[in-house]
Image (tube, rainbow, N blue to C red):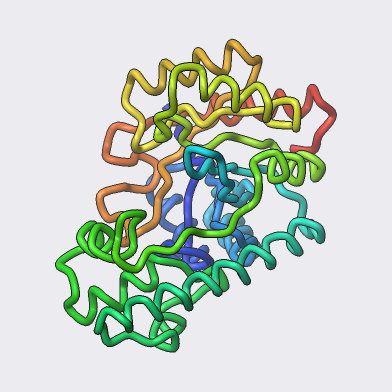
Amino acid sequence: MKLVDLHTHTTASDGTDSPALLMAKAAEAGLEAVAVTDHDTLSGLDEAADAGRKYGVELIRGCEISTATELGELHILGLWLPDNPVQLQEKLAFLRRKRAERNEGIVRKLQELGLDITMEEVLATATGESVGRPHIAEVLLRKGYAKNSREVFKEYLGCHGKAYLPKEVLEPEESVRLLADLGATVSLAHPMLWKGPSGWLDTQVARLKDCGLNAIEAWHSEHSEADVRACLSLAKRFDLGISGGSDYHGDNKPSICLGTGYGKLRVGVDVLESLRQRRMAAGLPV
């Protein structure tokens, strides 16, 4: 079965592979297509497109936007973004500014805890324009403040960590409308990772569909087989398309492999073709 991966990250945000290297690895893995979906930035897409042409792997231009709900964040994927979406670029720049303010606050809290870390070190660690907690974690790990990424997030950077600060993000409806207005396929990322009360996810999906949501990410490295079935049922109930991807981050999530996740993920090229057919039926470019 020919495979695709419609959820990946590069050094443009919090991955460790450059866009070109990611596309080279996709070719080596035999993937037909890859969506590069970096957090709050589109800066790696042109490099990925050039490399995709070189290696014979189709690039789906994308991004991932974090949004806020009463139960925590929901992540929204935009796929098939146009080449120069000015309004989206402006909104993502705003989010990166807010992310930078948060980073500075986290570093100050770490310094108050007695940890030797500076913002300059964090920025030197990042190679892309979207800088976040994984880059702070890398500095802390290099200096021996934790044994691994899981420990550093538990102790300092996670939602219960000593230096945690909440992130200022968009409302889900705003993000979905923003992407839908560009003609993107708008997908709810890894929906089963949020454990709300009974009916909560259905309510979210119903509201977001009215704003332009048109797909659900059913296959994901963190989804169980039961989660996949639940997503397929959810998509059927709301007449939504189905997507899937590994959420690959390179060495920042070393156990997740491009295209295969923890080893068993399989997103067939038929998933991509089904999404493409939905776009064609709606008169959108593919």
Give me the residue at 48% from left, 21% from top: 231
Quadrant into which the N terminus falls: top left
Q: In the picture shown, does residue 21 fall above or below 229?
A: below
Is residue 54 at least partly visible in the picture?
Answer: no
Is residue 206 visible from the viewing direction of this image?
yes
Q: Residue drawn 36% across and 30% down? A: 223
Task: Say above or below: 250 vs 179.
Answer: below
Percent of width and height locating residue 12:
53, 67
Between 265 and 214, the one lying in front of the other is: 214
Q: Position of residue 145 (x, y in %)?
A: 19, 75
On the rendered image, what quadrant is the C terminus found in? top right
In the rendered image, the vertical position of residue 148 relative to residue 199, given as above or below: below
Q: Work out whether residue 229 or residue 195 is closer to the camera in this orientation and state it.
A: 195
Residue positioned 63% across, 49% down in the render: 62
Q: Horizontal placement of 212 versus 128: left or right?
A: right
Residue 274 in the image: state x and y as whole percent.
Answer: 62, 23
Q: How many marks?
A: 0
* Residue 162 place in picture, x, y as percent: 29, 65
Q: Residue at x 32, y 70 (%)?
A: 137
For the residue pair 225 and 56, the one nearer the viewer reads as 225
